[in-house]
Amino acid sequence: MLEANFARDLATLHESVIVPLRHSTVIDDPVRRDAFIKEVFYNYEELRELNGALLHDLVTRQQEYKGGCVPGIGDILLKHFLNFKPFELYCAHMAMSVFFIDREIKVNKILEEFLDTQADDLRRHTIKHYLYSPSQRLTRYPLTLETIIETTDVNDPDYVRLKECNELSKCMASKANALANQLKRRVEIWEIHQCLEEEKGGYYNDLLCLTDSDRRLYHQGIVKRADNEQSHIRLLLFDHVLLMLKLKKGLPTGECQVWKKPIPLKMLFVEESRDFPLRGSSESLASLNSLGLRKRSSKTNGESLTSLTLHYMGRNGGVYRVTCAQPSEQEQWITEIENAKNLLQAKAHKHNLLTIRSKDDECFPLVATPDTRGCAHGKVQCSISFDDKKGQQKIIVGTTTGVYFKAIGHKNVRRVLACEDTTQLGIIGFHENRILLVLANKQLTAYPLETLDSPFNMKPPERLVQVIDRNIHFFKIGNCYGKDILIYKTRKSNGSRLTALKPQRLVELTKHSLTAALSSRKNSYFKDYKEFSISADVKDIVFAEHRLIVCFDHGYRVIDINNVKNPSDGLMPSEADLQSYGLRDLGSLRLLRVYNFRGKRLLCFNRFAMYIGAVDEVSRLHHHFVNVSHSLLWEWEGTPEDILFQEPYIIGVSQQFLEIWNIYTRELMDILVGDQLRVTNYGDASGLDPSIHLCMNYPEKPELQNIFSLRCH
């Protein structure tokens, strides 16, 4: 009788809902209509087939005994239960079915009217009654079987089969329940996605990527604002962010809006947790304030047991205090957040995101102290690595007191140049003809690297140096039209002067002629190539195939090195474009770097990064105007002073942390916290040292500086 009722429910669902719906225009688009039927009713056809086969065998067995007592059905049940996997899958998917039909009814009143017209055929039941029917049937099997087992003699051959069927039915129900719980979390995420759909034109959904298949919701709950107990906040802890939603007044339960900007887990610290940075730390308050962390607030004993103080590190951050209902809730939130952060860190390590190698962490003390044996080498400002003739890897370090050579893994440091305020180092050339370029006190000089590095060199540096130019702000080494080029910037009254030099047949120079050339007062090592002016204060130069991308604060120009008289203005977003992304207060906006990437320009500002469609600037010179596409990638969590690119990652370097973003997924992959972080080298044209060099001070021992390399995978 129970199987017959279930079969009738499935038949009613098929004949009164699914078939009419499939042949109607309730959902106009036929592709979307078929997808809706598949999502809501899932694998119901398999259930009809399984139920029909079971019911047929049960009826056949009953007819064999012509209304008499049936001796057993255990063999029939066992045969069919072994094929009931589709029931588990349907029951697990049921929460998704209900979500999809509720969502469609909310936006499609025609569907609601259609279901009302089918009410008589549905025997006055709602559509959800029929959606839940298979799940209820699966959970009733153990109850029904236990009743039959109680009335069956233990010596009856069917007793063992019935017991086995009962275990199978319990196992099916348990598996279905476990799968359903997983999908319920998925449905909760979809509901949150739907709730945020109207916020800023879906901006938060684009940012949070809640529809990703691997997105996880670890924990959620309702708390109160500490400064307004009438305001309730829904906290949702995902695998990548903490989302804070304010419940809307006067609206149905579940309706909410974003209270504060979502906090990436990498940027989140809980004041009450054991790993909060201010707990017993010796860092300065000013340094911590720049991290977005504040001094620990004083609380009463009662407050400390229930309050939760969330610190959002970085430029976009703040401190948000909420109150939990019970001390146990506070402890659970602390534990869940710590676990989520640990899982995120483990994921980064699993994917081998970064390789970090210390070049030196003790040989370059900033100031003289007893721990540094009275040594002080000044602030590290630049560095570069190279391999000497014997294959030993060495590092050259420029500081405020000079230029130093050091073998990696050894403690001996040798000062080779006593120049103050060394801001940039570079190497050009190959083999024994490599040239070390040093920018110190705005004077650019060149030295023979091998000669300078040799322990047998008896000549003082002043006999090896060749002065290239003075009043130089920075230089770049790159390749254009297959030629190595040194280009440097000097200031002029109305902008910048850029001078490009070409090295003279480096590989053909012998050691003797190279030293003689550098000892000459004449600049015989480089020859003039191009010189041109830009009516702006140039901040960076990027080599892009046959062109130079010259960046300044509020734009960039693209220059063909063989046609420097006709530069073209680079494509830039308008203020209206930026405001369409919700960006305001653009007065302090500065363009730091521009990169070419897969047919687009990657514009890296001090507040955000974005794509802009790369239109050939030649067409713009001839007034062929086109619509230019643009897309905001992300807003920086900090205020980067430099931005580096190692595909597929973009790295924003602020003084207190590095933020590493994936250019494909637009996801914040990692945060590396430090103190006085600065870039000391970003690759070179020769490819001798393609890694990124950075330097940081130790918070516990600020007199020590750690020079390390960073390479993304």
Image (cartoon, helix red, strand yellow):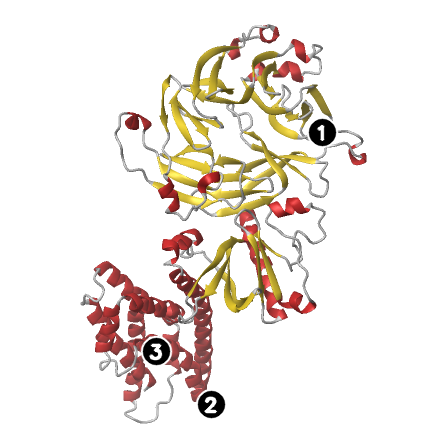
Query: Residue 133 bears which disc, if any?
Result: 3
Residue pictured at 43% horizontal, 22% vertical = 534
Where residue 271 appears, x then y in whole percent?
Answer: 63, 57
Looking at the rendered image, the disc whose residue lies closer to the viewer, 3 or 2, is 3
Which residue in the structure is indicated by mark 1? Answer: 410
Q: Secondary structure at mark 2?
A: helix
Q: Secondary structure at mark 1?
A: loop
First-in-chain label (3 vs 2): 3
Say if residue 238 shows up in the picture. Answer: yes
Q: Residues under labels 1 and 3: Cα distance?
A: 74 Å
Residue lying farthest front? 493
Quarter of the rendering containing residue 439: top right
Say if residue 42 shows up in the picture. Answer: no
Residue pictured at 22% horizontal, 82% vertical = 120
Looking at the rendered image, the disc whose residue lies closer to the viewer, 2 or 1, is 1
Which residue in the structure is indicated by mark 2? Answer: 150
Q: Secondary structure at mark 3?
A: helix
Quarter of the rendering containing residue 66: bottom left
Residue lying farthest bottom? 68
- Counting other residues with Cα less than 10 Å from the Cα at mark 1, is it few (<14), some (14-19), or many (20 or more)? few
Q: Residues under labels 2 and 1: Cα distance?
A: 81 Å
Relative depth, front residue between 388 and 522:
522
Where residue 337 appears, x then y in whole percent?
Answer: 57, 59
Residue pictured at 35% horizontal, 41% vertical = 630
The amino acid type found where label 1 is placed reads His
Where residue 595 appears, x then y in whole percent?
Answer: 43, 33
The amino acid type found where label 2 is placed reads Glu
Q: Relative to residue 645, is residue 160 depicted above or below?
A: below
